Image (cartoon, rainbow, N blue to C red):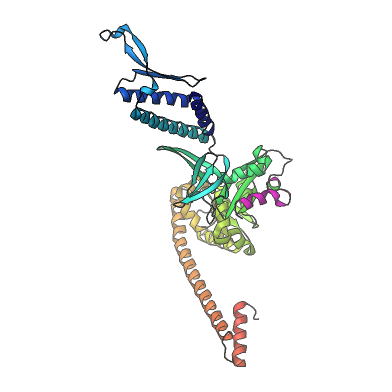
Amino acid sequence: MNSETLRILDSIARDRNIDRELLIGDLEQAMISAARKHFNSLDTEEFGCEMDRLTGRIVLWRNLPLDPDDPSAGTEREEIPLERLGRIPAQTAKQVMIQRFREDERNSLLDEFAKRQGELVTGVAQRYEGGALIVQIDRAEGFMPRSEQIPGEQFQPGDRVRCLILDVRDAVNQVKIVLSRSHPDFIRKLFETEVPEVAERVIEIKAMAREPGFRTKLAVASVDSKVDAVGACVGVRGSRIRNIVDELGGEKIDIVRWNESSQVLIANALKPAEVEEVSLCFELGRSTIIVREDQLSLAIGRRGQNVRLAARLTGWDIDILTPAEFAKGLEILESTVRGIEGISNEMLDKMGALGIISVFDVEEVGVAVLEQELGLTPELAEHVVATCSERSKEVAEQQARDKAENDARVAADREATDSILGVAGSGGTTPPAADAEGDRAADKILGGGQ
């Protein structure tokens, strides 16, 4: 039986990654608790226990004083046969062992997975609990909250799940392992796995912006001039990037070249759109991008996704204008400020260099910037800001009217188109005159008429 006990302890230590000595110490403490229960003792030093590490023999003893009236006289050991302990003390020993074994296992899990935090792991999907995905990772269960899942992604029990160990928490009676597939570091770890140059730090991921399940932008740079950062990440015929996209369920990944110049970086970040000019306003932390009319929708992206990710990647607020809109803003600013006494052409040029390109910008930067950067007197700076503020209200009102007129025009065109399509789609016979009139109206709406 003693050798059998050692084999059981060895098996538990191996399967649950717990130190064998800890388990033996737990067993000895459990036997001491059983003895105290049997003798109704409150003295923690009255009993002792030791297990032979080679034979597995357990020796339990009681420390009895040599002279009850003289504590300094010392004690003698009285060995207690294990058979002497009854059923209730044995049950106490069992409960203590189970509790201490569980604590040892929890501490072992905590130590192991705390070291693995931030690591990319592969587990097996088990089930969903309240929206959270439970994943079996080695000998532990991790959970992936809904907020850390990729939107629209579903796993079936038994599916392979590749994820990031985001956090390890010591909760009451258990270790909570938080997993993630939506965190930006998950993308970073995937690149380290698929692109050796990233893992070896030859290529560095300088910045990243992600909308999980939809699109990710990465800015990469190479420390070796012989290595093309973008080409290495994409791989031959897109082989490397394709593996990552497949793992993410088709999420788009844009890899752009990092540049220390904010102007160049912003232009790169807005790709695939072609940028004509980048104007930076450091005081507002904003960049104004000029793109051609045919590149406007590409630069903005679907539902503003491209410009939104570019702004997060570069750390700049981004406004996108066409050349006509940019020129109109400058024209309004120039006509507003030029009439103010004390404002010269040189000062207007400085405003443009500072990225102040509209009356709204002047109102936003305020008096202090005009005093420091343009050398204006406080009175003149206040006058310029006040003038631009009044003008900005007029421009805003005009823009609101133009937008309302445009919306009304679009609605009318849509209604006319629906009416024409309704006539054409009717089952009755349409007179030739009505057909000709409908054709002319449709040509006018669709831009085919001359």
Closest to the observer: 74 or 223?
Answer: 74
Q: Give the residues in magenta.
A: 232-249
**Is residue 242 within the magenta segment?**
yes
Position in image of residue 390 (x %, y %): 44, 61
In the image, is residue 300 above or below residue 231?
below
Position in image of residue 99 (x %, y %): 40, 32
Say how many tags the image has: 0
The residue at 50%/58% (across/down) is 359
Closest to the observer: 8 or 315?
Answer: 8
The residue at 44%/24% (across/down) is 25
- Quarter the C terminus occupies: bottom right
Q: Does 384 sit left or right of 262 as displayed?
A: left
Quadrant location of residue 318?
bottom right
Closest to the observer: 325 or 168?
Answer: 168
In the image, is residue 72 above or below residue 53?
above
Closest to the observer: 143 or 53?
Answer: 53
